[in-house]
Every structure is written in structure tokens, then in C-alpha cells.
């Protein structure tokens, strides 16, 4: 019994067309899709500001905040989100977690790999 190749091809083309029309991230400026992202212009301005800094000011702006003793660790930040956590890896300074976050009413699982500085 021979298959009708035209029917299979048309089915594939229909599926491909439907898939192309669906996107979790519509084609827009990236900063407008994900809340909190900086625009390209904001990033360029920050880079220009960093390039113009003296060494001490550069260290104060970039290195010192990471060494702040009151800065919360990754584990504490995840706990403060108050979202479902499906998996965790906690090996000293390595902390990884799989979280479920809401994006515009749609739940998505997000993986986090981080360095927990409480060690």
C-alpha cells in the first residue's frame, strides 16, 4: 500500500507554519520582552562610565559590592522568592536549584547555578 507523499508533506508544512507563528518571546526589543533588562543604550552608557573611572572608583563600583559581608547568599535569595523548588544541589559553595516562576501568568521552570558566598 503506497503512502500519499503530498498529504504527509502538507501536514508537515501546516505544523511548521503553526510552530512559526507561536513564540514565548515575540520579536521585539529584548529589553521590552523581559522586565528588568537594560537597553543596549543603557549598557553602552554604563560601559563608557566604567572606562572613564579611575582605578579606585572602578574597584569600588565593580569589586567591592561582591565582597560585601551583608550581601545575601544564593540559597537565601531563592528561599526569599517563595516559589516551588523542585531540585537542589548544595555542595559547599556550589548551589543549584530548579525553580518554577510565573512569567505573565504562565509557569516556567528555571534552572539556577550559582556560587553561594556564605562559605
Image (cartoon, rainbow, N blue to C red):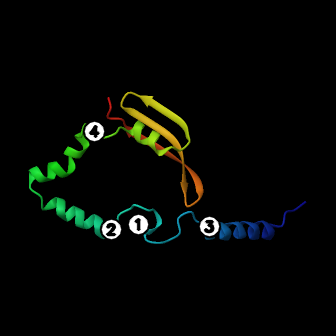
Residue 102 sits above or below residue 26 on the image: above
Residue that mark 4 sits on:
70
The reply to whether the C-beta atoms of the residues labelled 1 and 2 are less than 8 Å apart is yes
Residue that protrudes farthest toward the right in the picture:
1
Chain-order first, disc 1 or disc 4: 1
Give the Cα separation between the discs numbered 1 and 2: 8 Å
Q: How busy is the neighbourhood of tag 2: few (under 14 within 10 Å), some, or many (20 plus)?
A: few
Q: Secondary structure at mark 4?
A: loop
The reply to whether the C-beta atoms of the residues labelled 2 and 3 are less than 8 Å apart is no
Give the Cα separation between the discs numbered 1 and 3: 20 Å
Q: Which mark is residue 119?
A: none
Q: Secondary structure at mark 2?
A: helix
Residue that mark 2 sits on:
40
Q: Which mark is residue 22?
A: 3
The reply to whether the C-beta atoms of the residues labelled 1 and 3 are less than 8 Å apart is no
Q: How busy is the neighbourhood of tag 1: few (under 14 within 10 Å), some, or many (20 plus)?
A: few
- Closer to the observer: label 3 or label 4? 4
Give the Cα separation between the discs numbered 1 and 4: 30 Å
Q: Which mark is residue 31?
A: 1
Q: Secondary structure at mark 3?
A: loop
Q: Residue 16 versus residue 96: which sits nearer the camera?
A: 96
Q: Whole-percent x and y of residue 71?
A: 30, 41
Chain-order first, disc 1 or disc 2: 1
Amino acid at each position: 500500500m503506497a503512502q500519499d507523499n503530498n498529504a504527509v508533506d502538507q501536514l508537515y508544512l501546516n505544523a511548521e507554519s503553526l510552530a512559526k507563528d507561536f513564540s514565548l518571546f515575540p520579536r521585539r526589543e529584548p529589553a521590552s520582552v523581559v522586565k528588568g533588562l537594560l537597553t543596549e543604550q543603557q549598557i553602552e552608557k554604563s560601559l563608557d562610565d566604567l572606562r572613564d573611572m579611575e582605578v579606585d572608583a572602578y574597584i569600588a563600583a565593580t569589586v567591592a559590592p561582591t565582597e560585601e559581608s551583608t550581601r545575601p547568599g544564593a540559597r537565601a535569595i531563592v528561599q526569599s522568592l517563595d516559589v516551588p523548588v523542585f531540585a537542589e544541589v548544595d555542595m559547599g559553595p556550589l548551589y543549584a536549584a530548579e525553580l518554577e516562576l510565573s512569567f505573565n501568568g504562565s509557569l516556567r521552570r528555571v534552572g539556577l547555578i550559582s556560587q553561594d558566598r556564605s562559605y
